[in-house]
Each structure stands twice: as structure tokens, then as C-alpha cells.
């Protein structure tokens, strides 16, 4: 009986975690998009893409993205409900926009190298990524967009205000993930730019406006306190 009560209390306390069920919408939709890779699509390419070399070592931050996003979601889920909700809003709105764009505007690129100059653990991991992920459905880059979103959440959260190593580490990891998308030839520079621009737009909606509202609320409370 006590276990039932404790489980009920647990689910009530963390009921906001139910928004993670969004994954059951995103994944089937994304898999369906990937299944259309053999269909005609618009080619994404800008001139700087030709100047950027393939560097297999960037597979490490590219793969760390999965841990980075998942770790942030679960940390905020249990440690900071407000930041969890904001982060989910930021991520899921962007991911949905990405799905819609990919649905109505099929796109892809021809940037991946046909062969590698050398064979090592990094190129082997890159081959695995290439096999699992088609060079389609590119912009805005979710790797870029979500990395920026997680970093914003970490920098914004009061839990990390006094934890400079974590804040710096997050910034470095975010930058390395963004760079990995082009050095691995997973994305065009265009995808990176659109990911950054869209993240900046979403920041104004999810974080900047809420900060203004909080500031206004504090000012109103201060004025009331003075009157009393």
C-alpha cells in the first residue's frame, strides 16, 4: 500500500514529464521522412560547403549530442520544472517546424565523401552514422538547433549560476557539435545558419519575453511594497 502511495506521489510530482511523450509523435514522423530518401528532393548547397574539409574526429562531439540533449532533459525534469518546461517548448516547437519543412519541401545534399583517405575508429563510426541517417531532411539542423537550446537552458538556469566549469563546458560542447555537422558533411552551412537563426527567434519567444514578464512582476511587487 505504501509503495502505491509513493508511486502515485512520484507521478504527481513529475507529471510534467508527460510532455516527453512527444517522442512518439516525432520518431514515427521522422522515420517516415527518411523512408522518402529515394524520392526527388531539392539539393541544399552553398559555396562555403566546398571549402570545408572532412574531419572524421568530429564524430565524437556529433555523437555526444545525443547524451547532451537527453542528459539535459532528464536533469531539468527532476531538478527544475520551470526550466524543463521551457526547454521542452524550445526543442519541440523547433523539431515540429523541422518536420513540417521536411514534409512540404523534401531536401538533401551530395556533400558526403565517396571514400575516406584513411580508416580508423572515427571513420568507422562515421560510416555507421551515414548508414543510419540519410543525407536528406536537413534544415534547420536539429543537431545545431537543439544544442543551442540546451546550452541556453543551462546558462539560464540558476542551478548552474555558480558552476562555471559546467557553463563553460556546455558552451564548448555546443560549439563543437555545431562544427561537427559541417566537418562530417552531415549538413550544409545553410542548415547551420538556419538552425542558428531559428534558435535565436525561439529564444526571444521562450526566454527573453518571459524574462521581461518576470522583471515587470518584480517591479510591480516592489511598488506595492513601497506603498504599504
Image (tube, rainbow, N blue to C red):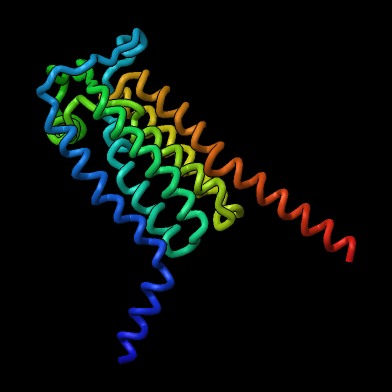
With 105 as the anchor, is 192 left or right in this view? Answer: right
Nearer the observer, 163 or 65: 65
Nearer the observer, 64 or 96: 96
| Residue 62, picture quadrant | top left
The residue that appears at 78% across and 52% down in the rendered structure is 219
Disc count in the image?
Answer: 0
Spot the residue most to the front. 104
| Residue 35, picture quadrant | top left
Q: Position of residue 34 (x, y in %)?
A: 16, 32
Q: Position of residue 77 (x, y in %)?
A: 42, 60
- Residue 52, visible in the rendered structure: yes
Q: Position of residue 150 (x, y in %)?
A: 44, 44
The residue that appears at 18% across and 33% down in the rendered structure is 33
Spot the residue most to the top. 47
Quarter of the rendering occupied by the C terminus: bottom right
- Residue 184, visible in the rendered structure: no
The residue that appears at 14% across and 26% down in the rendered structure is 37
Spot the residue most to the left. 38
Amino acid at each position: 500500500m505504501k509503495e502505491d502511495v509513493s508511486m502515485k506521489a512520484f507521478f504527481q510530482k513529475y507529471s510534467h514529464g508527460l510532455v516527453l511523450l512527444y517522442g512518439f509523435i516525432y520518431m514515427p514522423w521522422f522515420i517516415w521522412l527518411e523512408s522518402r530518401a529515394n524520392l526527388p528532393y531539392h539539393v541544399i548547397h552553398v559555396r562555403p560547403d566546398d571549402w570545408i574539409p572532412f574531419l572524421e574526429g568530429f564524430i565524437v562531439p556529433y555523437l555526444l549530442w545525443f547524451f547532451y540533449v537527453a542528459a539535459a532533459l532528464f536533469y531539468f525534469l527532476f531538478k527544475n520544472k520551470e526550466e524543463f518546461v521551457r526547454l521542452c517548448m524550445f526543442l519541440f516547437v523547433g523539431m515540429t517546424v523541422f518536420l513540417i519543412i521536411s514534409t512540404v519541401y523534401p531536401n538533401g545534399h551530395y556533400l558526403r565523401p565517396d571514400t575516406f583517405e584513411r580508416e580508423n575508429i572515427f571513420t568507422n563510426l562515421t560510416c555507421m552514422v551515414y548508414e543510419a541517417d540519410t543525407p536528406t531532411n536537413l534544415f534547420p539542423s536539429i543537431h545545431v538547433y537543439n544544442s543551442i537550446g540546451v546550452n541556453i537552458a543551462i546558462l539560464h538556469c540558476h542551478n548552474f549560476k555558480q558552476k562555471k566549469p559546467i557553463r563553460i563546458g556546455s558552451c564548448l560542447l555546443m560549439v563543437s557539435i555545431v562544427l561537427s555537422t559541417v566537418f562530417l558533411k552531415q549538413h550544409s552551412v545553410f542548415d547551420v545558419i538556419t538552425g542558428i537563426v531559428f534558435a535565436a527567434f525561439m529564444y526571444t519567444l521562450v526566454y527573453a519575453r518571459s524574462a521581461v514578464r518576470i522583471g515587470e512582476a518584480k517591479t510591480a511587487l516592489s511598488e506595492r511594497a513601497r506603498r504599504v
